[in-house]
Image (tube, helix red, strand yellow):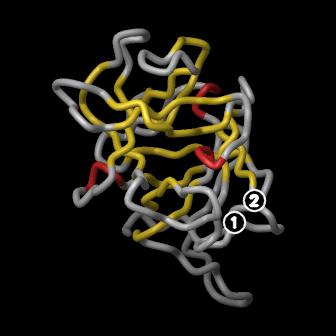
Amino acid sequence: KYRLFFLKKGGEAAAAAASLYDLLMLIPGSGQQSVTGVSAAEDSNSYWSVRGTSDAACHRGTLVQCGQNIRLTHVNTGRNLHSHYFTSPLSSNQEVSAFGENGEGDHLDEWTVLCAGPVWQRDESVRFRHTATEALLSVTGEQYGRPIHGQREVHGMMVSSSHSYWKSMEGVFMKPIETGSRDFSRHSLL
């Protein structure tokens, strides 16, 4: 489970930071569940789990490689972070939503992790590029009105900027399985 945090230019979290947040509210364009950015997320709607794709499993505790395709699944709803060619309602960028049920959706739920080294480090700023459309997961200053006043629009942008860097904050971070230990990757409890 990861809480993703928007980072301002220079890689420092600031008051304008926004957590990736999932609501049980539908977006006007596609009618899918909204994903927004909030400045202070103190509930479980900001928790996402990193999962493998339909083509490649991602076992618990395995390091996520830079360049690896993943799915980000919302912990509370079981829906995947999703994008497609719908236009986002506020900025007219590419819409980002939550889609699927129980972690199952489609190929438009896949994101490539872009980072500096060979693996995604917990304290490292990363970008997520939508695998099908190549848009970068971003949040800028556009804010919704009622009923989700003050929440920022999360969208896909074709150009990299300081608005497309994210950082995992609090959550449950699994240590990799040590050589020679028993494999608990299929264990059902967490």
Question: Residue 31's x, y, as percent?
Answer: 36, 12
Q: Residue at x 46, y 68 (%)?
A: 169
- Secondary structure of residue under mark 2: loop
If the image is split into quadrants, where does the C terminus sit?
A: bottom left
Question: Residue 182's x, y, as percent?
Answer: 61, 83
- Secondary structure of residue under mark 1: loop
Question: Residue 174's x, y, as percent?
Answer: 53, 75
Q: How many neighbours does mark 2 have within 10 angstroms: few (below 14), some (14-19), or many (20 or more)?
A: some
In the picture shown, does residue 26 fall above or below 130? above
153 or 116: which is nearer to us? 153
Q: Nearer the viewer, mark 1 or mark 2?
A: 2
Q: Residue at x 57, y 55 (%)?
A: 166
Query: Could you tell whether 173 is left or right of 179 in the image?
Result: left
Query: Identity of the amino acid at label 1?
Result: Trp
Mark 1 touches mark 2? (CB < 8 Å): yes
Q: Residue at x 70, y 51 (%)?
A: 113
28 or 102: which is nearer to us? 28
Query: Could you tell whether 137 is left or right of 6 in the image?
Result: right
Question: Residue 115's x, y, as percent?
Answer: 75, 59
Query: Could you tell whether 100 is left or right of 177 in the image?
Result: left
In the picture shown, does residue 61 fall above or below 135? below
Which badge, 1 or 2, comes first in the chain's sequence? 2
Picture disc at residue 168: none
In the picture shown, does residue 179 fall above or below 56? below
Picture disc at residue 115: 2
Query: Could you tell whether 94 is left or right of 3 in the image?
Result: right
Give the CA distance from mark 1 to mark 2.
6 Å
Reading the image, the residue beneath label 1 is: 120
